Amino acid sequence: MTLTPQILRALEGIVGPAGLVVSREGLLTYECDMHTFYKGAPEAVALPVSTEQVAAIVRLCRREHVPIVPRGSGTGLIGGAMAPVGGVMVSTTRMNRILELDFPNRCATVQPGLINLWLSQATREHGYFFAPDPSSQMVSSIGGNASTNAGGPHCLKYGITVNHVLGLEVVTGAGELVRLGGKAHERPGYDLTGVMVGAEGTLGLVTAVTVRLTHVPEGVKTILASFSTIEDASEAVSAIIRAGIIPAALEMLDEVVIRAIEEGVGAGYPKGAGAVLLIELDGPAAEIEAQSAPIEAICRDHLALEIRVAQSEAERALLWKGRKEAAGVFGRLTPNWLLQDAVVPRSKLPQIMKELLAIAARHRLVIANVFHAGDGNLHPLICYDDRVPGELERAKQANEELLGACLRLGGSVTGEHGVGLDKSGSLSMQFAAADLNFMARLRRTFDPDSIMNPGKLLPSHPACGEGFRPAVRPLPAGTWI
Amino acid sequence: MAVGAPALHEALGDIAGREHLLRDPAALADHAVDGLTPAAVIRPGSADEVSRVLGLCAAERLALVVRGSGTALALGNPPRRLDLVLDTSRLRTVRDYVPEDMVATVDAGVTLDALATHLAPHRQMLALDPPGGGSRSVGGVLATHASGSFRFRYGTGRDLLLGVRFVQADGTLTWGGAKVVKSVTGYDVPKLMVGSLGTLGVLVEATLRLHPVPPASRSWRLGFGSAAAARAFLAALLDSTLQPDRAALLDDGGLRRAGLAPDAVVLLIGVSSAPEAVESQGQALERLARAHQGRAEILADSAWRSLGAAAAGPVLLRVAAEPSRLLDWVTAAQSAAARLGVGVSVLAQPGHGVVQVSLWAASNPARIGPELIVPLRRAVEAEGGSLVVERAPTELKGSCEVWGSIDREILAITTRIKMEFDPDGLLAPGRFVGGL
């Protein structure tokens, strides 16, 4: 579809000339998120500065039947913040203020474009932080985190974004400006806040978020354990959980990833190890001490090569830097890759790792692994070179087989990245038609005219978007998983 | 077909078995909801049977209310009409439990006690301990969003329900969520179902996040001579690095009802961890209490199970407000009750701003609605909170809104959702917010 000059003028009237991008070069910046396969530039990008402007944009687009695509920082990995059928993209980057810090109620209200890490930085001196920590947290926005219900390494202990969202201000697809939830922890009626978090902008646009703040723990201890094989490391993970210990974070990195990180950012991971577990404990100091001994014993029982405890905050920060910037260094390994986010029940980790190795061997591909092992949330990175004929097809086949294997073990298609355009077709592997139908009808109650982020989150007719198209550019600079 | 029609009863009996269709007047009277007596009570034995019952209800336009253990049936407006009570107590199978995953999938009628017994050998638990106790059903606890002292660390059903199977008003068996601890695949349907009071579907199965039972735990009773001292202590506790796992606050009336020694205000705090961490946190907790003129004593673990008595009054109000205002609302409720000469007991959730106020007896019950509930609610709502009448005689419900005021736009969305999934108003019609 095409935006008429009248619509563009109306948009400019709402956000002003400085808040509207319409040039071809300008729009190209917005044609994809970090999943660069899916491209679709919007016809205009509006950068509102207030809730009122957002509401006016939605009213306009509703009247004119123009699709709206929300975008935070564009660090998503699912083909979410891109416009497969054109329309208006609404970017929250100019709505990035902290509206209120309320320490007595242990919460903060922020605009959606606020960068995740900024909130923790603003509250740490008061003894608080914002617990959801997606690896992209230094650039991703809290509105985006809420819309995708983002996870992160520490959600093993602290829960994912939805567990930290107390309230939302939203403009629904039906044009209503509503305040859902708030500082009070419960409220009569349906949990519309819970429905809106993770809805990927298909129900409405988030204009403010009230989030829980978590008290900084008394102590923290980061342990690195290396193993000769990923199977040993997987068994150790299952044994730790089985022992009734839930660390703050329990991350796995395999040999390929360790090598790439060491050549890239250099985090001090042991080269040559088959797998590394990054285990973090936090909480009361006595609890950390009591839990770290059995964890180290379990690692030794599972033939750990080395167990190292970070001796300083600098060393701890370096270990995490390696993990959080892992995906950014993959350019050293492979020109192209497919990334997955499937989940398996955590007891099935050793089994899925065996299957993964078999799938990689069968398709003659390298599959690198860096993931949230404690949750069973995999991030297999299927490496391929699209200059080699047939390799992309093999990678896609391996991707499908791996997804199928995860679901057969009782897992889920996506643990924290979300659905977007990328996985909308995979939902039918996990849900029956009745389940999808329920979700589609729920969507309609918020967005009766189907203008909100069309083509995303749920399976739809195949005419949507330009679909799966390999990018020529190998890698986005800096990607976080 | 009329509700009393023999053919209809036969059809219902065919689905669940004659012995699971109750029709004798005494049994029906026992299952009355706000004075409305159903024409029949059915106890389906499987999700499939629930689906067929609802299919029949849809075809015959029968209105139904779901009953779990019956503990929280008082919640909600009186139903607009009632033909059938669907009792979930025969849905009581633990479907799937892999201890290593710390996830269990159970039928909606499984009681908290039955589940606890199932999990105990593996030293795991479902961290939900709402007033009303272990005889409550998992489905009922979720549908009413009930919670207790474990909320302090583990949250509520909202945080613990991973996946849900339910039957829609037209009989369609539907699944939402996942069976793993982390999933963002599609909308978070479990969140929609928690607290929906059987108005969108009948919960038949829940997949729940479990937690390990920590190796050691100890509980303290911290007594304070005044609300002000308790308020200062609570603020300091929440702003500390201490990590209790459960908490409750009771007033003098609440303590007496729960069979505990009286005091002005008492905080009960539980700490669970490794033994040495329980020890050191306990010392820190006692020091903090003393610094706020509190008296710290060790509390027997069994005391937690008696707290429901503090919230068992014939009238139960639920105030939810900003957490920092907890003690102020406790005091406000106490004074409002005192003004009317009503006996009162308070059970509250520190850190979450939820106060359950039980009213026990009044010289003039007709004044409770207009002179206590309405003004207290007005004050709470003015600060962005809510006051729900969780339990009350039907006459009292008539004199004040059960749910309080709902924002106009939110009511519009809520109405669209209800109309989409229950257009004929068969699932607990009238019981929910806005008379939906």
Image (cartoon, helix red, strand yellow):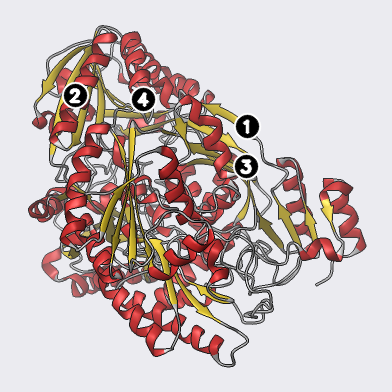
Residue at image mark 4: B238
Nearer the N terminus, badge 3 or badge 1? Answer: 1
Q: Report x, y in % for residue A84.
A: 69, 72
Q: Name the one closer to the observer, A356 or A64.
A: A356
Q: Which residue is mark 3?
A: A114
Mark 4 neighbour class, 10 Å CA radius: few under 14, some 14 to 19, many 20 or more: many
Q: Earlier in the sequence, mark 2 or mark 4?
A: 4
Q: Amino acid at mark 3?
A: Leu
Q: Secondary structure at mark 2?
A: helix
Q: Say which of A95 and A29 sits in front.
A: A29
Q: Which residue is mark 2?
A: B282
The chain holding disc 2 is: B
Q: Residue at x 16, y 38 (%)?
A: B274
- Side of B55 relative to A138 (left or right): left
Q: Secondary structure at mark 3?
A: loop
Chain identifier of the residue bearing label 4 in the image: B
Which of B51/A467 is in front? A467
Q: Is residue A456 above or below residue A398?
A: above
- For disc 3, the chain is A
User: Which amino acid type is shown beneath numbered disc 2?
Assistant: Gly
Q: Amino acid at mark 4?
A: Leu
Q: Are marks 1 and 2 on the same chain?
A: no
Answer whether residue B1 is visible to the viewer in this image.
no
Label 4 to label 1: alpha-carbon separation = 22 Å
In which chain is the residue bearing label 1?
A: A
